[in-house]
Image (spheres, rainbow, N blue to C red):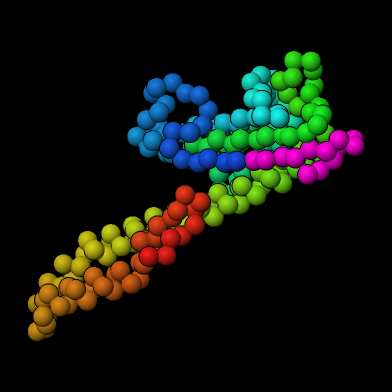
């Protein structure tokens, strides 16, 4: 919990990434988000869902302190593409909830939260924490993809290497091939990484 002008409040942030998440789109954009068109990480802008005391805030998003805090966060540091003054480009949903005995709405419509330094600081800290965890997951996935590609290259040329060596010297073809396959698996072990729902590596 933190305090603004003598009023206690607490910020909770959740982040979901992947699939067809993100801003509202037309049907033709869904293919891009699932990888059938544009790159999955840049197909669509992230979406921000705001709550105040468990009540969703549906309008005046650009005037809300919660939304501004997300835009001000430097998502490039977490491996996402972001233009200046805009949401990151990624299949992602960010949920932000503010609990307080007195939520400082900007108007009687109660659709946006006023911009206080204390509130913005707490939101940015919570969003940054989620961003760091997301960056760790994305880095691990990219590492796995790189090693998978490397293993594919090794596997593609193993038979040619075996045939060439067999033509030069006497060697058991099957044993030599098995040794090369085992060697490629050893040096590309990170291609077999598996992750749980929290992005942590599952030890097999």
* Count of labels in the image: 0
Q: In which quarter of the image is residue 80?
A: top right
Asked which quadrant contains residue 169, the reply is bottom left
Q: Where is residue 183 in the image (x, y as percent from the top left)?
A: 28, 74
Residue drawn where x is 40% and y is 60% of the image: 193
Q: Which of 106 and 86 is in front in this view?
A: 106
- Which residue sits at x=72%, y=46%? 125
Pinpoint residue 160: horizontal percent, then vertical percent.
16, 67
The residue under the point 78% across, 44% down is 1
Q: Can residue 68 be seen in this view?
A: no
| Above or below, 104 relative to 198 | above
Asked if 102 appears above or below 185 in the picture, the reply is above
Viewer can see residue 133: yes
Chain part drawn in magenta: 1-13
Q: Which of 166 and 21 is in front in this view?
A: 21
Instruction: Report the quarter where the C terminus lies.
Output: bottom left
Q: Where is residue 150 in the image (x, y as percent from the top left)?
A: 33, 61
**Residue 58 vertical placement versus 69 (above, below):** above
The residue lying furthest to the right in this view is: 6
Quarter residue 57 falls in: top right
| 182 on left or right of 35 | left
Residue at left offset 23%, top offset 73%: 180
Q: In this view, does 90 lie above or below 110?
A: below
- Is 65 colored magenta in this rendering? no
* Residue at the front extreme of this rendering: 101
């Amino acid at each position: 919990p933190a305090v603004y002008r003598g009023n206690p409040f607490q910020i909770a942030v959740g982040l979901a990434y992947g699939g067809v998440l993100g801003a509202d789109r037309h049907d033709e954009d869904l293919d891009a988000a699932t990888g059938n068109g544009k790159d999955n990480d840049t197909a669509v802008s992230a979406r921000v869902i705001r709550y105040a005391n468990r009540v969703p805030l549906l309008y005046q998003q650009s005037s809300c302190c919660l939304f501004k805090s997300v835009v001000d966060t430097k998502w490039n540091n977490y491996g996402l593409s972001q233009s200046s003054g805009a949401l990151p480009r990624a299949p992602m949903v960010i949920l932000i909830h503010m609990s307080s005995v007195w939520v400082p709405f900007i108007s009687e419509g109660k659709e946006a939260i006023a911009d206080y330094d204390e509130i913005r600081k707490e939101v940015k800290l919570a969003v940054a924490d989620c961003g760091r965890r997301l960056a760790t997951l994305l880095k691990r996935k990219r590492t796995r993809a790189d090693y998978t590609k490397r293993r594919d290259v090794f596997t593609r040329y193993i038979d040619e290497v075996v045939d060439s060596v067999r033509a030069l010297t006497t060697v058991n073809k099957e044993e030599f091939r098995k040794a090369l396959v085992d060697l490629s698996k050893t040096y590309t072990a990170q291609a077999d990484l598996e992750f749980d729902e929290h992005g942590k590596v599952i030890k097999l």
